[in-house]
Image (cartoon, helix red, strand yellow):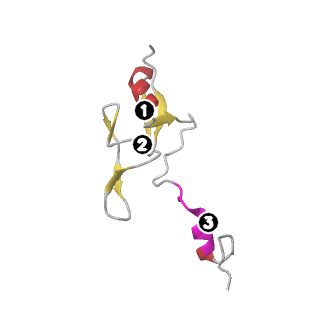
Amino acid sequence: MSTEKKPYRVTDRAGFFVAGIKVPAKRDEDGNLVPIVGHVLNLTEAEAKYELLSGSIEPAEASGEKAPLAPPPKDKAAKADKAGDGAGPQSAG
């Protein structure tokens, strides 16, 4: 196997350590400490093998862009409805 390191992005299935490397964490809306989804780790193929199979990382584009600090909103429809554009479900009445 190659010793060349490649970028891998941490998924929401990751814990606080991925391939023996501590993943940065932040507090969620309830105040719980959670790993940052989207953080990029540079790993060799050997280091990434198990983590890829478990789904805790995925190959990242080699664009060199920084990882997002937060995952995308889970419910875009609810946010759009709050904005008042009528994209969400409406009650009859």
What kind of secondary structure does the magenta stretch mostly adopt?
Answer: helix
Given contact means CB atoms under 8 Å apart, are the residues at marks 2 and 1 in contact?
Answer: yes
Q: Which residue is more in the foreground, 61 or 74? A: 74
Q: Residue at x 35, y 55 (%)?
A: 26
On the image, numbered disc 1 is attached to which residue? 54
In the image, is residue 73 part of the stretch drawn in magenta?
yes
Residues packed near mark 1 inside 10 Å, few (<14), some (14 to 19) or many (20 plus): few
Given contact means CB atoms under 8 Å apart, are the residues at marks 2 and 3 in contact?
Answer: no
Q: Which residue is more in the foreground, 73 or 36? A: 73
On the image, numbered disc 3 is attached to which residue? 77
- 2 or 1: tag closer to the N-terminus: 2
Which element carries disc 1, helix, strand or loop? helix
Q: Which residues are magenta?
A: 72-81
Which element carries disc 2, helix, strand or loop? loop
On the image, numbered disc 2 is attached to which residue? 13
Residues packed near mark 3 inside 10 Å, few (<14), some (14 to 19) or many (20 plus): some
- Give the amino acid type for the residue marked by disc 2 in the picture: Arg
Q: In the rendered image of this protein, does residue 75 appear above or below residue 59? A: below
Q: Position of residue 1 (x, y in %)?
A: 44, 13
Q: Which mark is residue 4?
A: none
